[in-house]
Amino acid sequence: MKISIIGAGIMGLSSAWALERLGHQVTVFEQGPIPNPLASSHDDHRLIRYAYGAEAGYMRMVGDAYALWDRLWADLGETLYHQTGTLAIATAATRWSRDSAEALARAGHAVEWLSPTALAQRFPLLEADTIGEAFYLPTGGVLLAERILRALAKLLAGRGVELRPYTPVGQVDPDRGRVTLTDGTLVGADAVIVAAGPWITRLVPGLRQRVTPSRQIVAYVEPPTGSAEAWGAMPMLLDIDAESGFFAVPPVAGTGLKFGDHSFSRRGDPDREREAVADEAAGLLADCRRRLCHGDPGQSHFKFAR
């Protein structure tokens, strides 16, 4: 089959990878460069973990995801993943960590609950007195997102997948397998896959009642010289509840120390507001410092918002 894919983020490129392996002829259209820094999947890293609160369906998919990542590493000839372990904490009376532990236990994943004393001894960078409860899970880690996108695009190009950067699509006719580019060019195929991320409602208007872009703040910091090595040895940190929370990603494999706002703004224009303004990022970091860290985790330098 001849298949057109719109969007060269991780969903579009991994779809192209899977389809090419099955012998299909694939073309990928991307409105910007490949990789595109504005893609939702573009950044230094993304987290993969089994802890998902009460969302057991997500948890059950993680094992399959790891197996597929292993298949991709075999094709790429390199592993773009760094295992960190998962540290779930709760600084308020929330159910997320308990729900995660219960769902994990039912699936056979044992967690290690840490008392405040044990938490302080094992992870001295954290302000254990402010944390209500915490558990550690040895699984989970960092996917090196931007490196994966770059390596996957190179692999696909070498296997005959047609990658068309800077080729924005204006309209999609999935029933006829047609893609109309913004310059008016009509491209036919047997099937069309739309992997346009936060732009998807512009191509598939029927999804507007189901899909809402959500702008979230991400900030990178430089750890103080004396604690840089300790931060590099930390697990990922998750402090999540139903409406808010944050995550922290340790500086591994040459990446930075990242703090992210896990609350969902349910607003945002993917073509605008990509830079986190100083007040937004400073507020995120101040909250992390107040709840977690002994001293100042470092001076922030800000990337685009997510």
Image (cartoon, rainbow, N blue to C red):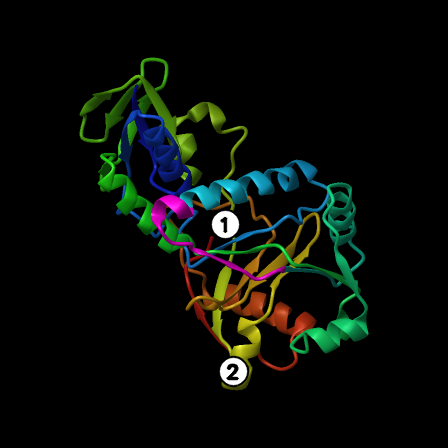
Q: Which residue is mark 2?
A: 224
Residue 30 showing in the rendered view: yes
**Mark 1 falls on what kind of element?**
loop
Q: Which residues are magenta?
A: 73-85
Is 89 colored magenta in this rendering? no
Which residue does the image show at 18% across and 25% down from the upper left?
Answer: 185
**Mark 2 falls on what kind of element?**
loop
Q: Is residue 190 above or below residue 110?
A: above
Q: Which residue is mark 1?
A: 215
Q: Is residue 288 left or right of residue 36?
A: right
Q: Is residue 276 left or right of residue 108?
A: left
Which residue does the image show at 63% across and 73% down from the upper left?
Answer: 289
Q: Is residue 263 above or below residue 286?
A: above
Is 82 colored magenta in this rendering? yes
- Image coordinates for residue 124, horizontal then vertical, percent: 68, 78
Q: Quadrant of residue 176?
A: top left
- Image coordinates for residue 102, horizontal then vertical, percent: 79, 46
Which residue does the image show at 36% across and 55% down from the upper left?
Answer: 147
Amino acid at circle 2? Pro
